[in-house]
Image (tube, rainbow, N blue to C red):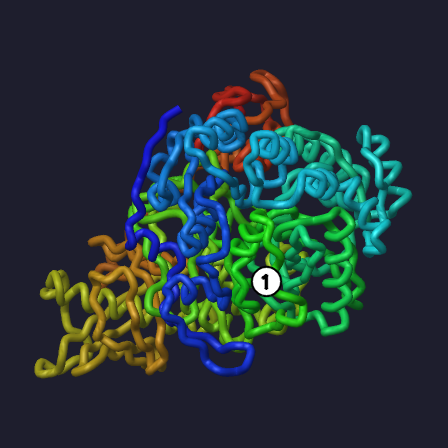
Amino acid sequence: MAFMIRQTGKSLYQHLFRCTQCTRIGFSGQRRHYSSAYNAELYTTTKIDKNEPTFDKILIANRGEIACRVISTCKAMGIKTVAIHSDVDSDSLHVRLADEAVCVGPAPSAQSYLDMDAIMKAIQETGAQAVHPGYGFLSENNEFSRRLAEAGVQFIGPPEGAISAMGDKLMSKQIAKQAAVNIVPGFDGVVKDEDEAIGHAKDIGYPVMIKASAGGGGKGMRIAWNDDELREGFRLSTQEAASSFGDDRLLIEKFIDNPRHIEIQVLCDGHGNAVYLNERECSIQRRNQKVIEEAPSTFLDEKTRKAMGEQAVALAKAVKYQSAGTVEFLVDSKRNFYFLEMNTRLQVEHPITECITGIDLVHQMIRVAKGHPLSITQDDIGIDGWAVECRVYAEDPYKATFGLPSIGRLHKYSEPQHIPNVRVDSGITEGSEISIYYDPMISKLVTYGPTRQAALDTMKQALDSYIIRGVTHNISLLQDVLIHPRFIEGAITTNFLPEEYPDGFKGHQLTKQERLQLVSMASSILMKQSHKNRAFKNQTRIGCRESAPTCLGLIVTLDNQKISVQVQEIEDCYKVTMGDKTVTVSKNWSLGSDLLDLQVDNQSFSIQLISHDATGNLKIQFMGTSYALTIVPTEVAELESLMPEKKKPDVSKEVISPMPGKLFSLTVEVGQKVFEGQEVCIVEAMKMHNSLYAGRTGIVKAVHFGPSDSIGEGDIIIQLE
């Protein structure tokens, strides 16, 4: 095991939570001012008592943004920190931010971040008095909690008994029922096989939800609407559960159609005190994983909020809970709510609760673990403004069910700058690598405002200003959801994405006005480029007098549609004409900037010029979506129209991996006949199992990979004759 010590630089610390305005509206309606950058960036009003006894050194048993998040609070409290890391994470941000760092193994999680022996050795070597597990990995592992207790090391989380009780979905439902918490109808035992599953499903009534008993994070979960879907879902969920949790037990419960996913944050101490910190709306999901969250919910009234909060606290007290935890509910259209599960850890989306309550949850977790009572009561907790969180993932939202992982190195990375009320929780910097070994989340982008609309407006601006190059990302999907009328109205359910994008996400569909704006901006970019390199100096000026400013006649191709454009440079702007429409585009911007702030008819836009080559091919990120345009002078377009079209290759004979990952299983062999739509293999990526199917009927000609082989996006796995 390698051991090293690193000092934390101020500039790295400031990277953790980037907030460009150190004020927000307080409970009293008076504007608060902060002298501490930590408080400003964290959106918290929690006062840290430096005289209160605490730990000298804490080890963070996690990586990435959550490790950075915990380190930030520890620094504010004067606590030294120890980071653990795999060999591929040796230069990661959380390693550089910690006071000390220990390598605990190679890249695969099972051999590093899940290796309890290696982590226990790191604790012993560094003399850490406590461990914060973050979320994921060992955060809800009662065996890890037990081993820490035996070693005299404090686990910054709930007691082992609470983890065990709430980590088992079967036991948690039984405890919830005894605590008078509303539960979803279902079968409370372990389902043995597919036939038994079908029997229970018929008793409960379709649709049903198949769930891993020891699961979480959407893994090992499937919805079945009939017997065939149940058989397939049972098989895939069993495999995922075994792979992700080492426990393949499944349960079945009624799937509540058109539900909202609303959760309650709780805080409990070892002195019998427990409070709820209002709710978070988490209904925008894909593959049972959250994408956009907000606090509070547009749907709950005060009566329902109070009832849900009181039931959440009752459940926590039933298992003698201590620390921060989250009780998740499904809420139907009549505000009936049903217990889903309890996460005995810090949630990914905890920042939005911190924004609207002013309470630093990590600070409270550390205080409780040290034995202090909560410093707040239920009467202290209000709702101060609105907060929205977007999970920015390294994934392609156009593939599969709204996203398949993307890997690569971030050769350019810049978080939103100079925008008030923006918080970015990330664990990466420019040059960081997104690998196949860990979750593909790049950051949690959080915005705050006195109203929901203010928070949403800020979020849209922040997403437009977020520069991520080197991997594919999901900003296009996030932006499109935020401007969707149904989302703006707040009429959302967990079915929002499949209902609004039944054929998958295809990118933002431009309106006529938006198309006009995009083409005018692209044409202005080409005009500015022509001035820079004089590429068009010999082109004929169209419709302009000799004494007039430069004019260009262009043909712009967008979505296979050709548009005739005339661009004229006048004193302080570009005048762009398309048919009977004429707009003006500002010219006080530089082509060398990654982010271009332009005005079209005095309306402000932030766009990104992702690429631009000498043949007139441009790629522009506009309203979150990347659009490919081709712009050439009119004369060139006339000549190009005479060129023959290149035929597209036939890929129906190939089964191609849509993502990087590992070939989990293969169900065909060379010489075997397969039919169109038949499952031929399963690819595992980020612990999720994805079935791949034959695109046509044929005979298997070649199989290029075997089970457990690593594969890349675009690799041909199977070829048909």
Q: Position of residue 585 (x, y in %)?
A: 28, 77
Q: Residues within 10 Å of mark 1 (few under 14, many from 20)?
A: few
Instruction: Find residue 142 and report its horizontal and vertical position in percent.
Output: 65, 35
Residue 248 visible in image: yes
Per the image, the residue denoted by label 1 is 375
Q: Is residue 266 above or below residue 209?
A: below
Name the residue at 16% across, 65% down. Answer: 530
Rendered image quadrant of residue 36 = bottom left
Residue 696 showing in the rendered view: no
Q: Is residue 629 left or right of residue 39?
A: left
Between 142 and 225, the residue placed more toward the observer is 142
Q: Residue shown at 88%/36% (left/top)?
A: 199
| Residue depicted at 23% across the width and 53% down the height | 613
In the displayed structure image, the side of residue 112 where residue 239 appears, left or right: right
Percent coordinates x, y for residue 146 in the rendering: 63, 32
Quadrant of the rendered structure where residue 521 is? bottom left
In the rendered view, does 332 fall on the left or right side of 639? right
Single out the residue that lies furthest toward the right.
203
Q: Helix, strand or loop at disc 1?
A: loop
Residue 368 percent across, percent down from the top left = 59, 52
